[in-house]
Amino acid sequence: MLDCAIIGAGLAGLVAARDLRHRGLDVVVLEARDRVGGRVENATLTDDTYVELGGQWIGAGHDALLDLVDRYGLKTIGLPTEGNLLVRVHGRVMAVPTRADGKELTPFEVADLSQGLLRLRRLAKRLAADPAWVEANEAWLQQDLRRWVRTNLRTGGAQERFEEVYAAAYGPMAEAETLVEGLRQVNSGPDLESMLATNGGLNQQRVDGGVAALCEAIAAELGDVVRLGQPVVKVSHQDEAELTLASGETVTARRVISTLPPRLAVALEHDPALPSWRAEAAEKVAAGNVIKAFLIYDRPFWRDKGLSGQSSSDEGAVRVTFDTTRQDSERGHLLGFFEGVEAGSLATRGVADRRQAFIDSAISAFGPEGAEAIEYVERDWTAEEYTGGCHGAHFAPGIWTSNGPVLAAPEGCLHWAGAEYAVRFNGYMEGAVRSGEEVAAAVARELI
């Protein structure tokens, strides 16, 4: 009998297996796909270069993930540091300069900025959805917008960066612009969080070779511990665990760790049955609706125009783009996302339609050269049987408060790990890594 069986070979499962092996325990990782990585995946282009179809960004404070990258001898690469960000609002195209001083925000400023933007977005949504609240807070909403910014963003770097991009998206802040006027701008314009996150100052990084290279390195260390093409269909979890595979084979272990997202996890047969609250919570934790796509060009033509390849728009099928061209590549790689309603609509149509929709967005942002793409690659994560959506899950209102922290609580010998079960960096690759480490430690304490 094994010490621990792990369902899923994404970051959480691989990290948990690695840590348990280092503690001298016998483990197996059962992966339904024919590859490791889960929501991390590379695609090879016709010139043998790669693009990342899944998770790829490493942000400030993602120390556990960066430690793994360093431990396996991999390197990180950053976003292009030159060129302007394009913002499209109501058909008007504006160029936002990147930081001329090259100054990056500190982790404290990043956290400050993120929290302030979250508050602003929530207020904007409430302004549109709750007339009674608006009426009751009419005087408060008339406060000076700059005063609100100074009150809610407490570091100078965050306040400065906010005002820079706000001015580019909506025009310079009027001398006496009110909070309610600012909230109306937020509701009608592009996503400020995307603009701020992509236009320098947040130190976004990628792994050279893709995060998939990290997953493959961990899997190589684990060797035949990782079994591919082994979907689990039933989990019996009483004093000990017995997993039934689609082939009919059974695997027994003293403990089991499931790294499946909540909706996929509860879809498996469990004996004993999972508590009703867990199934109800999983139903309200919807996976993201995202198609990640790339247009490949003979060269990154946008750089000739002094542009970074990064854009944010309030309309179109693809509303956010990034330049993910490698420094040693002659070709230009333009990344974009079909999200939400656009992703749902275009998912029912053919690849040619989605390619053209992306091209149309590229033309709107960067000019007629956007039509000259020589290759198109995509991944519709909602169509992936063993993923069911990406990036991370969306918690319905009240679900995280009531159930989020206990989603990771074990059910007897059954433990949970993954991005959706992480208390910190929930929904991020960093959260998956930390969750895998924490669950491995908990299982080891029970077994050793």
Image (cartoon, rainbow, N blue to C red):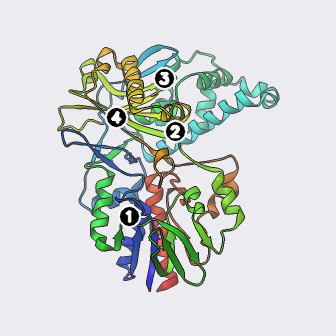
Instruction: Please tell me in which quadrant of the rendered image residue 152 appears.
Output: top right
Q: Earlier in the sequence, mark 4 or mark 1?
A: 1
Residue contact between numbered discs 3 and 4, judged by CB atoms under 8 Å = no
Residue contact between numbered discs 2 and 4, judged by CB atoms under 8 Å = no
Q: Which residue is mark 1?
A: 229
Would you call the spot at circle 3 few (<14 residues within 10 Å), some (14-19), or many (20 or more)?
Answer: some
Q: CA distance from mark 3 to mark 2?
A: 27 Å
Q: Earlier in the sequence, mark 1 or mark 3?
A: 1
Query: Label 3 amino acid?
Result: Gly
Q: Is residue 314 visible?
A: yes
Query: Label 4 amino acid?
Result: Phe
Relative depth, front residue between 111 and 9: 9
Query: Label 2 amino acid?
Result: Leu
Q: Which residue is mark 3?
A: 316
Q: CA distance from mark 1 to mark 2?
A: 43 Å
Indicate whether 88 appears above or below 242. above
What numbered label is drawn on residue 294? 4
Q: Position of residue 405 (x, y in %)?
A: 62, 61
Q: Is disc 4 placed on a helix, strand or loop?
A: strand
Q: Position of residue 309 (x, y in %)?
A: 33, 27
Relative depth, front residue between 94 and 45: 45
Relative depth, front residue between 216 and 69: 216
Q: Which residue is mark 2?
A: 113
